[in-house]
Amino acid sequence: MFNLSGKVALVTGASRGIGRAIAARLAEQGATVVAAARGDHANECVAGLVADGRKAEALSLDVTDQAAVEAAPGGIIAEHGRLDILVSNAGITRDQLLMRMKRDDWDAVLATNLTATFLLAQAAMRPMLKQRSGRIIAVSSVVGQMGNAGQTNYAASKAGLIGFAKALAREVASRAITVNVVAPGLVETDMTRAIKEDTKVDWATQIPLGRLGRVDDVAAAVCFLASDEAAYITGHVLAVNGGMYM
């Protein structure tokens, strides 16, 4: 579909769910994928890709560790000579009604979902500016567009990604670097599979396409934005939500 041969991609939160699907899709299209996650959590993902003949390696990375994040692109450059694609996907939730939400829960979600993207993009920009090319893609959420009760911290972080990407897109466009956002809706993941079936059926009634999304739906959107075919798209929010929010 999209030829990413010769490209090097860094994907955070790549151990499972959407991040794992993104790493797999980029690798399938020929990219060398650096799959980042805490500890050794990305090892299984990478082992499967390598077994299928893909180019992939695991990177132990805590995206809230500023020093580690700032060093990661340099390590990739030293190993591969370039960094073409950054997919900032790592994210967490700490759901609670605002009146009961603890400051630690607010800070943790903003640090992982928003501040980490700032640090990653800032570090990745340096080699991309020298190359005069690059793709920065942030994974937001439909919640950042329409809100959701009990998720003020999550919604703020995901909405912040949209504003961040639009502003950064204007800063780096002259160097042929694009900055875009993919905003998934309700997606079938390990977390949603544990939810009662009748609840998921109720959710699906809110979605015009009548089903929850699949991780591959999101991965396909990311792969497109990472490709040469999307070279004239920047500052865009690509909603992958089945029409839940328009």
Image (spheres, rainbow, N blue to C red):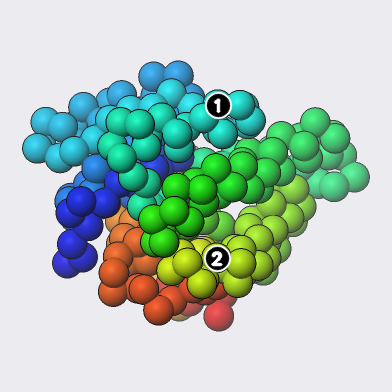
**Mark 1: few, some, or many residues within 10 Å (few <14, many ≥20)?**
some
| Up-down relation of residue 189 to residue 242 (above or below) | above
Near-viewer residue (185 or 127): 127
Within the image, what quadrant is residue 115 found in?
A: top right
Q: Give the residue displayed 36% in from the left and 52% down from the top.
A: 84
Rendered location of residue 57, percent (x, y): 28, 30
Q: Is residue 193 visible?
A: no
Q: Which residue is mark 1?
A: 68
Side of 184 relative to 43 (left or right):
right
SS for callout 1: helix
Q: Is residue 197 above or below residue 73?
A: below
Q: Which residue sits furthest front?
A: 130
What x and y, as percent, mark residue 208? 45, 78
Work out which residue is located at the far right of the displayed protein and give it.
Answer: 99
Q: Earlier in the sequence, mark 2 or mark 1?
A: 1
Label 2 to label 1: alpha-carbon separation: 24 Å
Q: Which residue is mark 2?
A: 172
Give residue 132's quadrant in the image. bottom left
Q: Is residue 240 left or right of residue 80?
A: right
Q: Amino acid at mark 1?
A: Ala
- The residue sitting at 52% across, 51% down in the picture is 125
Where residue 209 sits in the image (x, y, percent)?
39, 75
**Mark nearer the viewer, 2 or 1:** 2
Question: In the rendered structure, which amino acid carries the disc numbered 2?
Answer: Val
Q: Which mark, by number, is residue 35?
A: none
Whether 242 is drawn above or below 92: the answer is below
Looking at the rendered structure, the secondary structure element under dot 2 is helix
- Label 2 crowd (10 A; few <14 / some 14-19 / many >=20): some
